[in-house]
């Protein structure tokens, strides 16, 4: 596809929009609040409740969030518990934090993260993302690993903007950081079970305590299931009912705490998922609009292909630390992860084809498609050594080495639905990725109120890739290959920031950071003739950010505001579908983004905790000579069209990034009524809103997802000082069902969010 440098555009109008967004968001923050950790200090009798200092590890050490020069948001245990009560996977965090969107065309197995609009719509199993997910200090690089269930966690931290100085891989957009609850010396534990709509069952539990004089352990487990609740109206379909799942996960931790100078934490974990893959729906949109078709029923679909999903992952890690002196600590963090999966679905989302007698349902499918993607072989090793100072004076530093080694095999399979679903195409990709980095970070307290920080990271990244067509497919490439590609790049990432304590309650900060993402390679060859892998060169991001973090109203409220702007050179993007049904990696000459984010939480009264969050993100692709293939004749493209080499292409210069909502709002409120003997009645509600999003790089009336509002409600009663809790809950209580993604195919295929779930839950802890 043609690709040349394009002239930059002026952003005068967009700058005015940004100024308006700042004003509106500040006005909103006076009355509402967003999720940061709403931990309350226990007041003395007659004193008002206040917020404890929010502690985070955003800079790889424990410190007050107020002192960290990064836009960040945290989610505490109670909020995680409420959001996940309906059996949701990690996508329940989408829209619940500023500038965060999470979506998936693989269902529960393959989440795609977007921060400030930066993400990757690529659905290939070796796809890289500019958002890094770090789980218990281990980088989870493969998208299948990033869906590990959210259970028995201490907290979640969302770090926005490039984080490459201190975090291990591909972080130009930011980091989502999960921290499990750790072993304890006291015997503690909990168990919770819930049951709701569609047989949605959710069990979670943990037990923690001492294991001899010098050791402690923690065992955590979860189990979730949902019945198949969507009826297949095709009586001859291989799946009569769909959309169920059965998932379990386990985490075992062993901690050595018998020394003042040496500490060790070992972690073993595993996940199993069986169920339905993403359910695609043919002709979901009314042509020329983004309305769902007349008579749409979320409980029904008509397909003739098989649909299932199997996934197994397991891993282990060891985190060791040595206090070499009172002023130096050495850390060693070793991690191993592995995944195995197979996901098969009816991509056309309907029955038959338009050229067949009596086909198709819904009408308008030019030809059928059924495919599968498998990961028969995957492993990942990571190793980090980090030395950290703890001087009493104004100067401190960190330095370390990081190593990453991933080996992956991906199978892409095609099936002939008309011949009963027999295999009719097989392509395979093999990739070995090795990378290492040396990094360092320093901080210096210039005065008691002003601190400077700076970081530097050198990275070398190598990929060896080969793709082959092992079995030819109709309309596609013949048996051929292997087609080999090698990449070898190095880069220097950096950041410089400062924090100024304007008053005892207010900190101001500013930060400039450079991020980097290594080249990506893709080899989905079944529908390409001649077959040829595509390569996207390394992308680089420069981000500018300034903000304020404040404690307000005698620490009854907490406010964080961040203004940002970033420029991406050579952004890696994924052009999917079109008339040739290809998937191709490209680089956009430049992408720009700007916006504002707010985090605010407060005790409105001693019994009412309200939080509010908001973000405005304005993104634009700037490449006057970048064109992509639009949908294969089914959608209404609004971009300028050109014909090159007999192929119709859409110009995407000036378009926003896909899956990048301009506005994200979220609100929570918890009201409690204290009763006698430490008992309590409470009501907890949460709401998340995101504005419209484009599903693809080009703009089409059908493939623009409508704004989405999802609300939750929980009404509960606790007794025995919180040891027991019984509640009724609802997720998506407005039953707001919207298209949340599409398949750029030939018949307006899309998929929707979960409908309303209502249930009851019981929890006990000791």
Image: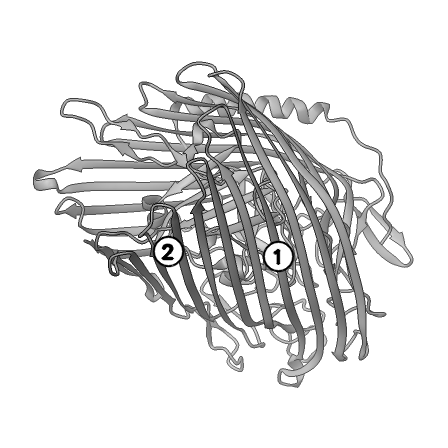
Residue 42, x across and y down, in percent: 21, 31
The residue under label 2 is: 151
Using the image as rendered, state which of residue 363 and residue 263 is in the foreground: 263
> Quick check: 88 left or right of 42?
right
Q: Nearer the viewer, residue 449 or 680?
A: 449
Residue nearest the observer in this picture, 386 or 295: 386
Please say whether residue 295 is visible from this viewpoint.
no
Residue underneath mark 1: 404
At label 1, counting other C-alpha atoms closer than 10 Å, the crowd grade (few under 14, some 14-19, many 20 or more) is many
Name the element at disc 2: loop
N-term-proximal mark, 1 vs 2: 2
Q: Where 209 falls versus 663 (above or below)?
A: below
Image coordinates of residue 272 in percent, x first then y, are 44, 70
Q: Among all residues in the image, which is located at the extreme front? A: 325
- Element under disc 1: strand
Q: Residue at x 54, y 71 (%)?
A: 340
Relative placement, left or right, of 445 versus 620 is: left
Q: Is residue 759 left or right of residue 94?
A: left
Residue 727 against residue 549 in the figure, above or below: below
Quarter assignment of residue 582: bottom right
Closer to the camera in the image, 599 or 737: 599
Who's the residue at 60% across and 21% down the image? 19
Residue at 37% in and 41% down: 686
Q: Is residue 36 left or right of residue 234?
A: left
């Amino acid at each position: 596809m043609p690709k040349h440098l394009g002239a930059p555009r002026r952003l005068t109008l967009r700058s005015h929009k940004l100024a308006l967004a700042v004003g509106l968001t500040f006005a909103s923050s006076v009355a509402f609040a967003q999720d940061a950790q709403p931990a309350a200090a226990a007041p003395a009798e007659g004193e008002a409740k206040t917020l404890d200092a929010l502690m985070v590890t955003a800079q790889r050490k424990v410190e007050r969030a107020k002192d960290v020069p990064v836009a960040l948001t945290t989610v505490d245990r109670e909020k995680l518990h409420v959001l996940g009560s309906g059996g949701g996977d990690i996508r329940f965090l989408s829209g619940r934090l500023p500038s965060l969107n999470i979506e998936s065309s693989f269902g529960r197995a393959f989440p795609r993260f977007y921060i400030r609009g930066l993400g990757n719509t690529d659905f290939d199993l070796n796809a890289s993302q500019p958002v890094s997910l770090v789980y218990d200090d281990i980088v989870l690089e493969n998208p299948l690993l990033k869906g590990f269930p959210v259970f028995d966690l201490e907290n979640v931290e969302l770090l926005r903007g490039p984080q490459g100085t201190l975090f291990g891989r591909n972080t130009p957009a930011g980091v989502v950081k999960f921290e499990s609850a750790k072993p304890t010396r006291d015997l503690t534990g909990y168990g919770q079970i819930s049951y709701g709509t569609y047989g949605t069952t959710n069990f979670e539990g943990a037990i923690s305590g001492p294991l001899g004089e010098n050791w402690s352990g923690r065992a955590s487990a979860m189990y979730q299931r949902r019945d198949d609740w969507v009826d297949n109206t095709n009586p001859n379909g291989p799946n009569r009912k769909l959309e169920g799942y059965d998932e379990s996960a386990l985490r075992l931790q062993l901690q050595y705490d018998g020394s003042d100078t040496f500490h060790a934490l070992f972690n073993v974990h595993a996940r199993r998922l069986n169920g339905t893959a993403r359910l695609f729906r043919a002709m979901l949109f009314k042509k020329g609009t983004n309305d769902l078709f007349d008579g749409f029923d979320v409980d029904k679909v008509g397909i003739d292909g098989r649909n299932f999903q199997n996934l197994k992952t397991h891993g282990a890690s060891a985190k060791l630390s040595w206090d070499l002196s009172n002023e130096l600590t050495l850390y060693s963090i070793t991690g191993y992860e592995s995944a195995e999966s197979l996901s098969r679905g009816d991509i056309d989302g309907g029955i038959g084809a338009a050229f067949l007698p009596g086909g198709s349902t819904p009408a308008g499918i030019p030809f059928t498609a059924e495919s599968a993607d498998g990961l028969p072989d995957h492993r990942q090793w990571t190793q980090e050594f980090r030395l950290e100072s703890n001087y009493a004076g104004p100067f401190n530093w960190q330095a370390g080495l990081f190593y990453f080694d991933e080996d992956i095999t991906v199978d892409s399979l095609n099936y002939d639905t008309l011949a009963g679903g027999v295999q009719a195409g097989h392509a395979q990709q093999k990739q070995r990725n090795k990378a290492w980095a040396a990094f360092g970070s320093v901080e210096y307290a210039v005065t008691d109120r002003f601190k400077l920080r700076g970081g530097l990271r050198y990275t070398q990244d190598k990929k060896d890739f080969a793709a082959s067509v092992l079995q030819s497919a109709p309309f596609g490439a013949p048996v051929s290959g292997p087609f080999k590609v090698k990449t070898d790049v190095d880069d220097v990432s950096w950041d410089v920031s400062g924090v100024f304590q304007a008053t005892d309650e207010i900190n101001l900060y500013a930060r400039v950071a450079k991020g980097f993402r290594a080249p990506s390679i893709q080899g989905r060859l079944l529908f390409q003739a001649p077959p040829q892998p595509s390569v996207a060169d390394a992308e680089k991001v420069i981000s500018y950010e300034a903000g304020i973090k404040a404690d307000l109203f005698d620490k009854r409220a907490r406010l964080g505001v961040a203004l940002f702007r970033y420029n991406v050179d050579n952004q890696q993007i994924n052009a999917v579908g079109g008339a040739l049904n290809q998937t191709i990696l490209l680089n956009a000459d430049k992408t720009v983004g700007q916006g504002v984010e707010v985090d605010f939480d407060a005790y409105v009264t001693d019994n009412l905790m309200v939080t509010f969050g908001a973000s405005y993100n304005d993104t634009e692709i700037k490449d006057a000579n970048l064109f992509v293939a639009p949908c294969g004749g089914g959608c209404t493209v609004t971009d300028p069209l050109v014909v090159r080499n007999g192929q119709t292409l859409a110009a995407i210069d000036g378009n926003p990034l896909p899956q990048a909502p301009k506005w994200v709002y979220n609100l929570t409120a918890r009201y409690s009524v204290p009763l006698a003997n430490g008992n309590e009645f409470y009501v907890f509600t949460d709401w998340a809103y995101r504005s419209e999003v484009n599903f693809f790089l080009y703009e089409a009336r059908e493939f623009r997802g409508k704004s989405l509002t999802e609300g939750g409600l929980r009404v509960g009663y606790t007794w025995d000082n919180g040891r027991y809790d019984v509640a009724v809950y609802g997720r998506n209580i407005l039953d707001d069902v919207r298209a949340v993604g599409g398949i750029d195919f030939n018949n307006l295929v899309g998929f929707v969010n979960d409908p309303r779930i209502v249930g009851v839950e019981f929890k006990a802890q000791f």
